[in-house]
Image (spheres, coloured by chain):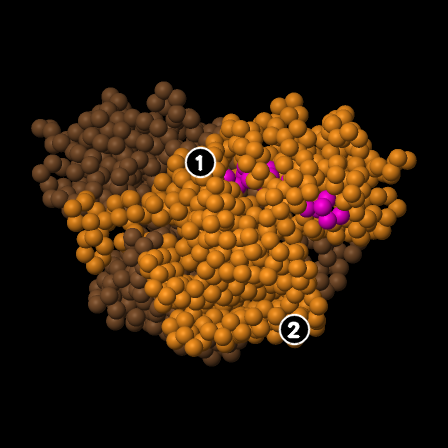
Chain colours: A orange, B brown
Amino acid sequence: MPSYSAPVKDMQFLMHDVFNIAQQDVPGYAELEQDFTAAILEEAGKIASNVLAPLNAVGDAEGCRLENGVVRTPTGFKDAFDQMRQGGWPGLDMPSEYGGQNMPHVIGTAVGEMFSAANQAFTMYQGLTHGAASAILAHGTDAQKNTYLPNMVSCQWTGTMNLTEPHCGTDLGLMRTRAEPQTDGSYQISGQKIFISSGEHDLAENIIHLVLAKIPGGPEGIKGVSLFIVPKFLVNDDGSLGPRNSLSCGKIEHKMGIHGNSTCVMNYDGATGYLLGEAHKGMRAMFTMMNEARLGVGMQGLAQADVAYQNALAYAKDRLQGRAVTGAENPNGPADPLIVHPDIRRALMDQKSFTEAARAFMLWGAALIDRAHRNNDSAADGLVSLLTPVIKGFLTDEGYDMTVKAQQIYGGHGYIEEWGMSQFTRDARIAMIYEGANGVQALDLVGRKLASDGGKHVMAFFDLVKSFIKENEDHADLKTQFLDPLKAASKDLQSATMFFMQNGMKSPNAALAGSNDFMHLFGHVCLGLMWAQIAKASFAALAAGTSDTAFHQAKLATGRYYMQRRLPATALHLTRINSGAAPVMDLPAEAF
Amino acid sequence: MPSYSAPVKDMQFLMHDVFNIAQQDVPGYAELEQDFTAAILEEAGKIASNVLAPLNAVGDAEGCRLENGVVRTPTGFKDAFDQMRQGGWPGLDMPSEYGGQNMPHVIGTAVGEMFSAANQAFTMYQGLTHGAASAILAHGTDAQKNTYLPNMVSCQWTGTMNLTEPHCGTDLGLMRTRAEPQTDGSYQISGQKIFISSGEHDLAENIIHLVLAKIPGGPEGIKGVSLFIVPKFLVNDDGSLGPRNSLSCGKIEHKMGIHGNSTCVMNYDGATGYLLGEAHKGMRAMFTMMNEARLGVGMQGLAQADVAYQNALAYAKDRLQGRAVTGAENPNGPADPLIVHPDIRRALMDQKSFTEAARAFMLWGAALIDRAHRNNDSAADGLVSLLTPVIKGFLTDEGYDMTVKAQQIYGGHGYIEEWGMSQFTRDARIAMIYEGANGVQALDLVGRKLASDGGKHVMAFFDLVKSFIKENEDHADLKTQFLDPLKAASKDLQSATMFFMQNGMKSPNAALAGSNDFMHLFGHVCLGLMWAQIAKASFAALAAGTSDTAFHQAKLATGRYYMQRRLPATALHLTRINSGAAPVMDLPAEAF
């Protein structure tokens, strides 16, 4: 049975030694001193390891059951959800006026990683609630905020997002769900939505569905889509629960993974709904939720990679099999542990060098969001918008691959469900698909984000990399081991960007044929930048005579692995991008 | 629900236009005329599509059940197994003296791909029987052959291979199962074996277990391992079934995939066994079976990739979502089919360009085996030994990735079990693990095969590539589109080989740190060589005025995709190999 240990030390190092968050000029950051963040992270880590992780296999084995319209979550989920509520974790980074603790998003992200790693299916119940609450916070009227937010911030009520219909997921313009205006200002919502995570369950007394639907007579396609608040139980003026709304869960899906989360077919039969934001501007409101969700999903990629790695590492140290090629390292035992074998070490280093840099990338992204929201910093907002598809697409593609590598270390036992490694890959698999499949992320990156505001944000990214290199190249080891490879990789990214600038307009197929490679190329450069920043901090700590030399030496060795063995992938991605549209599009569809 | 269509046309093209098998100087090949192979392949294709494929999802959903020591296979498996027997398929490439049809291995491989693609879990029952029969054929006494082979060739009885124990899989020297010699020349086998595919089931009246065990007093470790025939029911002198042997299935495993195949814990409690081959030379005998099994597993990687691709392609043509960036292609419909989108096309081309070349690679490998066995050609034997870990490791790693890409095309539906795409990835996952995890394949390649016979076989491979390029470079299009990229990739492979030659002895860790990359680098060069050979045949057909221009144009376009977008991966693998041991081994085990 796998276990999970929260990476508190690594997070503390990133927050304080690498990013110096307490010194940043962002409202709320000054309070984030070492001791304060340590206390929060340790407490969250205990819940993750002791409450959520033990329920992960239970949730997978039992799954959810639909009985007479009611969904039963797995054994133990209800108690654990109560504990989360009692600890105030769901409202950690929500506004205090609605009962939250008003912490910065960087803290919410660190804690969220722990909860997701320990139990992704469980954590989705509160994750989606957080997203729905954010959408109401951004687009709701005061009355709507007062009616829904206090109970959603506490997770007394949970939330969902309803986009997909059987015939349309990515292409929401094809949507058929209707919203008929009523004389009292409300709407009657009718239609079927599928793949609704946490759509029905027994963890909360009410569920607030955010539902995309079309108001008859509105514009065609995606421009005629509006967003509605559709509660499972209507809410009386005094805040108490009123009658049951006309909506129901018709089915729960039998999925490859995340069995502990109920994925529902939701039927709306003239259900009462309330417009959220403006009519026909539903996509804008939904994007508040989706952008947050996309970052959260990128984090799931990292989280599953980390927990899978932790268990693979433990197995590699424990399982005795074969002898080191350079001579026995456990001469008194019947064999050496797996970790002595270079190919096992290679697989572990792939995972470790990804996970630690991906964590830095997530925290950096979260800090950009804090800067955007708390400082109204439009440059930070533009940069994190650019990076959102990279975080979602790259971290989930790579995160999944890492769970597969972790599973592989177990040999045959990795394929047997009771060992738990299969669940990590099965759970991680969904993150490449939901909240916009990774192909859609790549399209968003190349087709929209790259050129937005005249390409200003990607230029800002290049400047940031260039400045970092310039400011630090006096350090000879940092330069040769980290900055030089980063410079080469960044050059590949610039070449690819140039290719798109030159070809994007005249041959959009050439740009889109390379979109997946561009997303990965960009992701590698981001992780390379993270490793360079981590290395700077570790070199500094070692030079300052830190007592924790092993920690910092390990950081440097892991970073060097990434720079030498992972980052050179940028050249391959560039080669593919430069091959343009022809190889991809030459074969006519009918000739397949 | 997915379907499967047998690639008869593609196989015919490969056998006859690319490899000209009927003209090869191999006993039995002259009979393999177009019409003859077409008749066999079409018949096999019908069984695959109509009998086996419909049971694939059934097997996954029902799994096997152990009840009072008896394993029940899923609904329909027994009838289908009877049909396989009646058609004589299990003995297709087995000797006629034991009831087989004596066909070359190249035919068995083509048919095997179809059966595996249609239903991997089901096909394993007969696949393992084939392997066990081959081991008895190669190492058994005449009496043993006469006793077991006729019923195994017909699959009246099935076979298994028993290697793994709870504490040892790869490192079989740690084995604890004992074989006590009896006065009548038999042995009493005692011990526990795990992960025994088809270890117990209701498809056959007897099961012939081949079991590795140690005879007390023999040499320590792997040199003291012997192989035994341990039938479920002892066989009387007249061939009838005698008493039940003292062995039993203690448990069946709950696995990530291949649910339709029973993976058993087998307990031997003083079971009667008969030495197969020489005492303490069990590994040699087992390797006859394992080498065959490794090629068969490589084929499974290809097979799952192909069936997943077929269904992804159908979905991409059918599912309407979004509009082509260059203008609507289905203007009268609500949206265009997925296949218009470049990133979907990219994913399909990845799959198609892999699958078609991998099929050629498998058939080429099978032809080398025929040449080795039927012509006693030691060069062919050496070459296929070298290529075996590449076929097993590369085709299953890539094959799995391709199933993941196919699943991704379905978006959210790919994650829902009833759509069937999840099963392809879950079933394909085991192929990277069993019959020697892919890390072991890479170790075998770099640590053993590369230098065997003084490196003669890898040199022969390079000569073969070089000659092919030289003989065909007069064809300008073939040269620029196929031979030049092949030459570049082959040069990367040669550089990597040189690196191992120079460093392997003085720094074995440096060689092994790059073993996985070398296996993939080698695999890409092999598929590049296959594409060059395919392109030669298609250019020739087009020049000769074939009426089937679309087929050959598609081959050339698909091949160009591989050469431009997949084959350049060799440079990345070489970069990683050249980085040597340091990045991988610098971090001490205790610092992880």
Amino acid on which disc 2 is placed: Met
Camera-nearest residue between B577 and B283 = B577
Q: Which residues are magenta?
A: A119-139
For image coordinates 62% across by 56% down, the residue present is A27
Q: Please tell me in which quadrant of the rendered image residue B521 appears.
A: bottom left
Compared to residue B421, the image places residue B511 above or below, namely below
> Magenta: predominant secondary structure element?
helix
Above or below for B292 versus B500: above
Q: Residue at x 47, y 79 (%)?
A: B474
Quarter of the picture containing the N terminus of chain A is top left
| Residue type, numbered disc 1 | Asn
Q: Which mark is residue B493?
A: none
Along the polypeptide, which appears first: circle 1 or circle 2? 1
The residue carrying mark 2 is A501
Furthest-right residue in this view: A183
Q: Quadrant of residue B259?
A: top left
Location of residue A60 with respect to A511 vertically, above or below: above
Residue A216 x, y percent position in the rendering = 86, 43
Horizontal arrangement in the rendering, residue B233 relative to residue A579 (left or right): left
Instruction: Give the number of the disc on residue A50.
Output: 1
**Neighbour tally class for label 1: few under 14, some 14-19, many 20 plus, Cα within 10 Å:** some
Which callout, 1 or 2, points to the residue nearer the camera?
A: 1
Q: What's the chain of the residue with tag 1?
A: A
Quadrant of the image containing the C terminus of chain A: bottom right
What residue appears at the point 13 percent right and 31 percent down from the top-left corner? B180
Is residue B162 rendered magenta in the image?
A: no
